[in-house]
Amino acid sequence: MDLRLQNVSHFYGATEVMRDITLDIPSGQIVCIVGPSGCGKSTLLRMLGGLERPSAGQVLQLGAPPADCLNPLTYIFQDFALLPWRSVRGNVALALEDHRLARSEREAIIADVLARTKLGDFAEALPRQLSGGMKQRVAIARALAVRPAVMLMDEPLSALDSQTRELLMDDLVALWTRQPFTAVYVTHNLAEAVRLGHRIVVLSRRPGQIREIVKIDTSLSARAHGDAALEAHQRHLWGLMRDEAAAADAELLDV
Ligand SMILES: Nc1ncnc2c1ncn2[C@@H]1O[C@H](COP(=O)(O)OP(=O)(O)OP(=O)(O)O)[C@@H](O)[C@H]1O
């Protein structure tokens, strides 16, 4: 299943936050969205997830989700959103509770996603016993459990320290390489975007418009930290964003 935004514009009251965005999210790719603060990245994600309706234009789901998909669109948030009184297994199981599954099938899904996120040995741990990186891996496991057509990821690594971020990027690359998934990945961090994005959509400051879509053909598994070609992409992205980010920053200070 692909997603498409077609000529989407959006207002909050009199404030125009997004203007005429047309964008395809092809199945099996990670599409990163970058842009200055307040340009509408999270709003765009909410529209793709059906949580918000655009003032104009359409959000389309093209094709059917995979046959075994339990929930076509699922979110991963910056703050993990785990239930503190439930174990790792319990948090993952939560995503499956609304679905009619045989106990054995449910257990097989939980075992599979815990193994894929390297959490098999921590199934009975509580969130407070886990590091930030492990908590986010639980959130990723919970998202994968419903076999989504598209994962909507809103700055999933930005609450983590830089070393943990590096490790989780490696984990996401390994997950995708083993079994490609489709994701829209909002981030402020251009290093994350060039490491994880098959395409990187650069938005202008508010009202957010598409300035450029940067395509990176190098396979995810061949991209390494400090790679010269990736750094060149990153410099290009920063060149596109620098003035807009400065202007957006000044605008916030004026409020
Ligand atoms: N529910 C809402 N009601 C009114 N204004 C809103 C609402 N949600 C967001 N906004 C405003 O819309 C604009 C876009 O917000 P959004 O959170 O989508 O931007 P963003 O690019 O994700 O920002 P950031 O990078 O700071 O997270 C901002 O100016 C924000 O203040």
Image (cartoon, grey):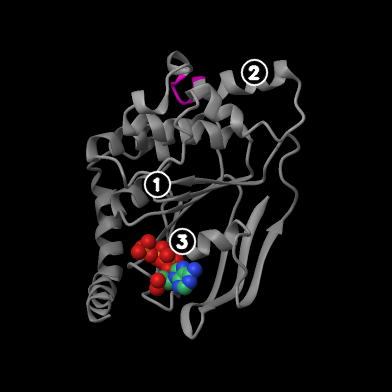
Identified by mark 2, the residue type is: Ala
Marking on residue 238: none
Question: Disc 3 marks which residue?
Answer: 42
Say which residue appears at 46% left-offset and 61% top-offset.
42
Give the alpha-carbon distance from disc 1 to disc 3, as whole Å: 11 Å
Question: Disc 1 marks which residue?
Answer: 78
Position in image of residue 84 (x %, y %): 44, 31
Identified by mark 1, the residue type is: Gln
Please say if 250 is above or below 139.
below
Please say if 69 is above or below 237.
above
Residue 39 visible in the displayed image: no
Residue 240 visible in the displayed image: yes
Residue 116: say if magenta: yes
Position in image of residue 3 (x %, y %): 63, 57
Mark 1 and mark 3 lie on one chain; the one further toward the N terminus is: 3
Mark 3 and mark 2 lie on one chain; the one further toward the N terminus is: 3
Q: Which residues are magenta?
A: 115-119
Q: Residues within 10 Å of mark 2 (few under 14, many from 20)?
A: few
Position in image of residue 75 (x %, y %): 53, 47
Mark 2 and mark 1 lie on one chain; the one further toward the N terminus is: 1
Marking on residue 108: 2
